[in-house]
Amino acid sequence: MTARSSSAFGRCGRHAAGQAFAVDLRAATDLFDEDVRGRATLVPATPDRGPLLEIGTPTARDRTGRFGDVAGRWVFWDFDGTLAARDRTWSGTLLDALAAVEPDHGLTVETLRPQLASRLPWHDAATPHPHLNDADDWWAAMRRLFLGAYLRAGVAEGPARRAVGGFRDHYLDPAHWSVFPDSAAALDRLSAAGYQHMIVSNHVPELHWLVSALGLADHFDEVLTSASVGFEKPHPGIFRCALERAGSPRTAHMVGDNPTADVQGARAVGLPAILVRGPNGVGLADAATEILGGR
């Protein structure tokens, strides 16, 4: 299979652009449009999981040609920190981009990090940004943010502008990314059981390209990014968009490493979610086992 970029499907993020939200499990069904609620069965939460949601009815054949009771089963995956990781943070990438044009800049990550605090799009997930769904518009907004960070840190405007111009290439360089050793095996195991996969990530517009460069594209039917649909996890808009792109699936699960963006956000719209990595998360093999056990 070949992953499709969300950039072609911006419309699925626009219908609720003005709606506010709160991560509230008690109000899960109210986060859906009326037509979705009419086809949804919500199983209440228990102490060890969020509410389970089944939407629509299974079809005889899904769009990949699979038949029977495997149709309409999806896993939504976070990307950074779940399937792969970058060796440098956003602040670190700013430092690398600056070093390329001003090697003796004298700054550190600790100097730059506060200049980005609370300013990246996912720091204000309650505010949709459909006006930035175009990749060039999104990066133009980010360049303004990065320029401000450099200037506040004391970088002269000339080098700062040149560094901003190189940031995009630095960030997307596959040499700085690595896929976790257990990612492919978990994806393969679930695919063999009939599941389809979608990346649902707070990420740059070119994530589909990066997924391909890292050798993961064949595992995914869709790549959905916040930059392309105008919603940052945990906003329900991005999860609604994922469900729409999946064609109102029979079942879907969210897997991610962020307790708020991935787990609370998904559960707030009725999606069962599994926390992975970190001190409180499980490995991807265990996540796959949990998904297969629930079917």
Image (cartoon, helix red, strand yellow):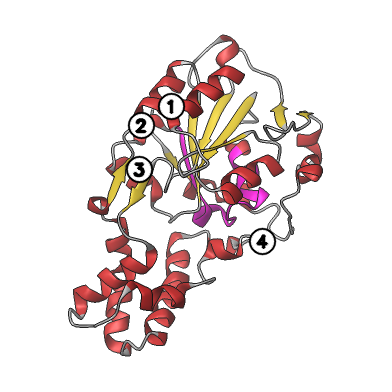
| Residue furthest left as drawn | 103
Q: Position of residue 288 (x, y in %)?
A: 48, 25
- Taking the spot 50% from the left edge, 72% from the top edge, the residue there is 117
Residue position for label 1:
285
Q: Earlier in the sequence, mark 2 or mark 1?
A: 2
Amino acid at the residue labelled 3:
Val
Q: Is any part of residue 246 visible from this angle?
A: no
| Residue furthest top as drawn | 68
Q: Is any part of residue 288 visible from this angle?
A: yes
Residue position for label 4:
126
Q: CA distance from mark 1 to mark 4?
A: 32 Å
Residue position for label 3:
211
Q: Nearer the viewer, mark 4 or mark 3?
A: 4
Q: Earlier in the sequence, mark 1 or mark 3?
A: 3
Q: CA distance from mark 2 to mark 4?
A: 32 Å
SS class, disc 3? helix
182 left or right of 229 in image: left
Amino acid at the residue labelled 2:
Asp
Amino acid at the residue labelled 4:
Ala
Q: CA distance from mark 3 to mark 2?
A: 16 Å
CB-based contact (under 8 Å), mark 2 and mark 1: yes
Q: Position of residue 125 (x, y in %)?
A: 61, 60
SS class, disc 1? helix
